[in-house]
Image: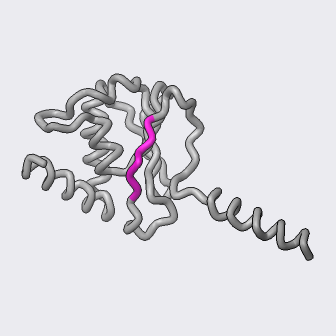
Amino acid sequence: MKFYLSLLIYAVPAIFFSCSKSQSLNCSIENYIQSSHYNFSNGMKNQQRNMKTLYTLKDWDQQYLDTKYSCKDIITQFFFCNICCNSKQNEIITYSGRSFEFKNSSSVIDLTTAVIDLLGTMSIGNLENQILSDSINSGN
């Protein structure tokens, strides 16, 4: 009986805390930008998206157009994405696990715009895009 109680005490928390709110992304820690933001209201299994990108960690610090936000801020805060830098392609994996590749992005700014444009056509992404637009327009 004591064995089963011990097993229960250790197994339940291990199973509970091992469940992720994001898909796994095979990325080395020195190339990884982890979003601290989760979209808990999206009704999906995953509360974060994942991106693979050709660009470096430093590239993502560029200011996005005429906003006060960096490209990294836009992608991680408003669109709930983790970013794996120095990858072989530019790709986003949505909340549902669907993958989209971006072949014609000549800069991290172009890629950020392409991601916003793509996600803006999706129901959840459209709402996130509206929050971004409201934040840019209000100066916050």
Left or right of 108, for residue 18: right
Residue at the farthest left position:
138
The residue nearer to you, when weighing 99 against 74, is 74
Residue 21: x and y in percent read 52, 58
Residue 128: x and y in percent read 27, 57
Q: Is residue 95 above or below residue 7?
A: above
Q: Residue at x 13, y 55 (%)?
A: 134
Quarter residue 59 falls in:
top left
Q: Residue at x 15, y 37 (%)?
A: 68
What range is drawn magenta here?
A: 33-38
Q: Is residue 44 above or below residue 106?
A: below
Q: Residue at x 45, y 59 (%)?
A: 47
The residue nearer to you, when weighing 5 against 93, is 5
Q: Residue at x 26, y 54 (%)?
A: 120
Q: Is residue 124 above or below residue 2?
A: above
Residue 127: x and y in percent read 25, 62
Residue 74: x and y in percent read 27, 43
Q: Is residue 75 above or below residue 31?
A: below
Task: Specify the principal SS of the magenta part.
Answer: loop
Residue at the farthest bottom position:
1
The residue nearer to you, when weighing 118 against 68, is 68
